[in-house]
Structure formats: structure tokens, C-alpha cells
Amino acid sequence: MFRESRYTYEPTKAELRQYNVVSFLLLPHYRKYVRNLPIKETDHVLDYCTGPGILARELAKRLSKGSLHVADVSETWLRITVKRLAGYDRVYSHRLETLGELIGGGGLDKVICHFVLHEFPRRYQKRAVHQLANNLRNGGELFIREPVSEHHGVGADWLTQVLTDSGIEIRSRKEGRATLLGAYVDLWGVKCEDENE
Ligand SMILES: C[S@@+](CC[C@H](N)C(=O)[O-])C[C@H]1O[C@@H](n2cnc3c(N)ncnc32)[C@H](O)[C@@H]1O
């Protein structure tokens, strides 16, 4: 049984400086990733642990009639992202107080989780995945990209199993490699609630 749990994290000044540079260098990666996501302009989308909000800005450009929810366990990152998205309408920010919280009523069309779960301490990772799944409507889609390196990543098989346990039917699993980011796994899935529950 999943219980809510408190977890917060704030980046150090050194991390903030490093991300400013790295995020800029990663812009082509972010753009390509978002371009290839099957998102409609009317979708209600969550960018889970948005960090500096670079990916979120690419998402906002595609949601001319829908809405974008940005969430983070870090107040600092959320403040930076909100500033970055100031020119876009229907953007809602959520400071995650607990890993059980529902966002946008929990009925979102798409949830994106890009290079996030591997950063969470191991004991919170499953809870974060459950939270992602709980925020989707039935039939909604989840897109996760996580590094799979032994030293700084998650196990692709482990993550696939946790998603399945959270009611996500995996539709696609692909491995790839990107400059600066290394090896990663892309998992795309659909929330399938048991009608009899
Ligand atoms: C690498 S950033 C990715 C941000 C964004 N999704 C992207 O792809 O640009 C990691 C995210 O995980 C969150 N996080 C949670 N726990 C963390 C931890 N222990 N160390 C670093 N980041 C952590 C941060 O607040 C941040 O939003």
C-alpha cells in the first residue's frame, strides 16, 4: 500500500551554476526529445521534477490550447522555472510537499519524467513512480527517460517492473545514448485501471 511521504531537495550553488551551462548545451537534446513526444496542443501535461525548466519551456510551446503543470521537490528550481515560463499561458506550478500529492486533479493526459528518478534516494524512487502514475487519467500516457549507467542511473528492468506494478502498461522500451548524458532508457506507457476495482 502506497503511503504519502515527505521528501525535499535543494540544489547547491555549484549545482545551479553547473546546470546553467549544461542545460544550455543540452538544448538540442531537449528539443529533439520533446519534438518526438506524441503530445497534442489540447493536452494537459505534467513535467515532473522540472529542474531548470528548459524541457518545460519546449513543452509549453506545444500546448497552445492545453495546460502545463510543472512540479518539483525543490523550491529553488520551481522559482527558476516559473520565471522562465512567465510568457506562457496556462502554466501551473506545484511545489511537491509529499510524494503522494495529486496534481491537476490527478486526471492529466500526459506525464513526462526526464532524468529525475535516479536522483531520488533509493527508498523514495518507487513512491515517486506511483505518484507519476496516480496523476494520469485512465488511458493517459507516461514518458520516462532515465540514465542506466551503473554508477548514476536506475536499472531498466527494475523501472519497467515498478511501472507495471503502478498500473502502467509498457508500450515501448528503447535504449539510447546522448552526448553529455550517456546511456539512457526510454519507457513509454499507458495507465490502465482495472475496471473491476
Ligand atoms: C537532473 S535534474 C532534471 C530536471 C529536468 N527534468 C530536466 O531534464 O532538465 C533532477 C531533478 O530531480 C530533482 N531531485 C530530487 N532529488 C534530487 C537529488 N537528491 N539530487 C538532485 N536532484 C534531485 C531535482 O529537484 C530536479 O528537478
Image: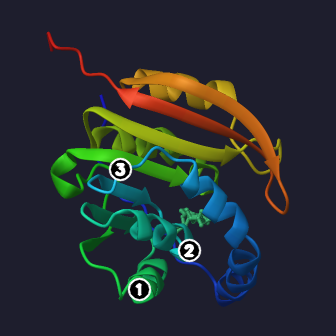
Label 2: how many Cα within 10 Å (few below 14, some 14–19, many 20+):
some
The quadrant of the rendering that contains the C terminus is: top left
Q: CA distance from mark 1 to mark 3?
A: 27 Å
User: Where does residue 118 sit, x and y in percent of width and height?
Assistant: 64, 50
> From what the image shows, is residue 173 above or below residue 5?
above
Tell me the amino acid under the disc marked 1: Arg
In-front residue for pair 111/42: 42
The residue that label 2 is drawn on is 54
Q: CA distance from mark 1 to mark 2?
A: 13 Å
Q: Are the residues tagged 1 and 2 within 8 Å (C-beta)? A: no
User: Where does residue 35 sit, x and y in percent of width and height?
Assistant: 56, 55
Tell whether circle 2 marks a residue whose Cβ is less than 8 angstroms from ligand 1.
yes
Residue at the image point whose x is 66% and y is 24% from the top? 157
| Label 2: which secondary element | helix
Ligand 1 lies in which image quarter?
Answer: bottom right
Mark 1 or mark 3: which is in front? 3
The quadrant of the rendering that contains the N terminus is: top left
In-front residue for pair 62/130: 62
Q: Residue 23 sits in which quadrant?
A: bottom right
Nearest to N terminus: mark 1 or mark 2: 2
In the displayed structure, does residue 26 sit left or right of residue 167?
right
Instruction: Single out the residue that lies furthest toward the top.
Output: 196
In the displayed structure, does residue 18 sit left or right of residue 73?
right
| Label 3: which secondary element | loop
> Which colour assignment does the render follow?
rainbow
Q: CA distance from mark 3 to mark 2?
A: 19 Å
Q: Residue 47 sits in which quadrant?
A: bottom left
- On the question of residue 96 being in view, the answer is no
The residue that label 3 is drawn on is 40
| Label 1: which secondary element | helix
The residue that label 1 is drawn on is 79
- On the question of residue 151 being in view, the answer is yes
